[in-house]
Image: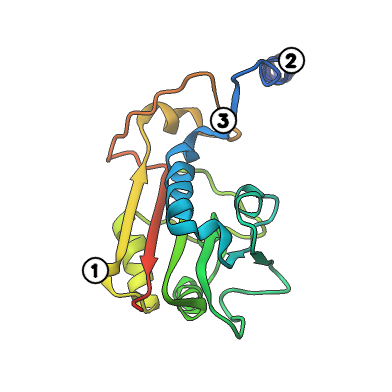
Amino acid sequence: MRHIKRSLYTARDNFRNIARKIPGYDKRNWLRIRQIESFISLLIENGRTASPVLEISPGWNTYWKTMCSDYTSVDYPEFDICRDRLDRQFPTVIADQVLEHVPRPVEASRNIFAMTAPGGWAMVATPFLFRVHARPHDYNRWTKDGLRQLLVEGGFEAEHVQAFAWGNRACARAHVGGPVHDYGFWRDMRNDEEYPLMVWAFAQRPA
């Protein structure tokens, strides 16, 4: 049985590698499509891609580094967002798939607030209905209301925090016990509020 499963996984991976070479194949994570689109929309407003951007612990993610010409990043463990903050502020601060991994999220939220310049935006995203992925630890999950409250507890005013969520049953089933799925050529992008896989929020610090 193990041999059969291993063969099926190998065949699936081989098919995926072939499909990725076909023009039009979308390599973005299915569960992150709407979040990525939302982040891009905010970044291109008012030329934010040309103004200073700070990203917290991007790891392998190069989405925002590629888009932003004045880009700074800080990475764990040299920089611990629960404990550390830079001595400067930025018009845009990004924490994309970070807060689920921190043991003291309120402290992290306070440090994000402190590094967001007056009039600037914090952009935060985290999974909800997604497997435990300890890199190196996995501590937290929030609904969109929970993520909004976390940012408020960090110092942002409630009326200046916008929270969003996306997901559906098909995407939730596809990600039970398996790897992250590419969007590919077609996936169900309907949103079911009862099955949020990805949650994100934009918080503006008053000028």
What residue sits right under mark 1 in the picture? Answer: 159
Q: Residue at x 53, y 62 (%)?
A: 94
Question: Residue at position x 48%, y 19% from top?
Answer: 186
Q: Within 10 angstroms of label 1, few (less than 14), some, or many (20 or more) residues?
A: few
On screen, 178 above or below 155?
above
**Nearer the observer, 189 or 8:** 189
Residue mark closest to the camera, 1 vs 2: 1
Q: Amino acid at mark 1?
A: Glu
User: Which numbered disc, 3 or 1, marks the residue that appears first in the sequence?
Assistant: 1
Amino acid type, mark 2? Ser
Secondary-structure class at tag 2: helix
Q: Nearer the viewer, residue 119 or 77?
A: 119
Residue occupied by mark 3: 181
Q: Position of residue 85 (x, y in %)?
A: 59, 81
Q: Residue furthest left?
A: 159
Q: Earlier in the sequence, mark 3 or mark 2?
A: 2
Secondary element type, mark 3:
loop
Quarter of the picture containing the C terminus is: bottom left
Quadrant of residue 177 in the image?
A: top right
State left or right for residue 142 relative to residue 40.
left
How far apart are labels 3 and 2 at the CA level?
Answer: 19 Å
Q: Dot 3: within a 10 Å radius of its alpha carbon, few (fewer than 14), some, or many (20 or more) residues?
A: some
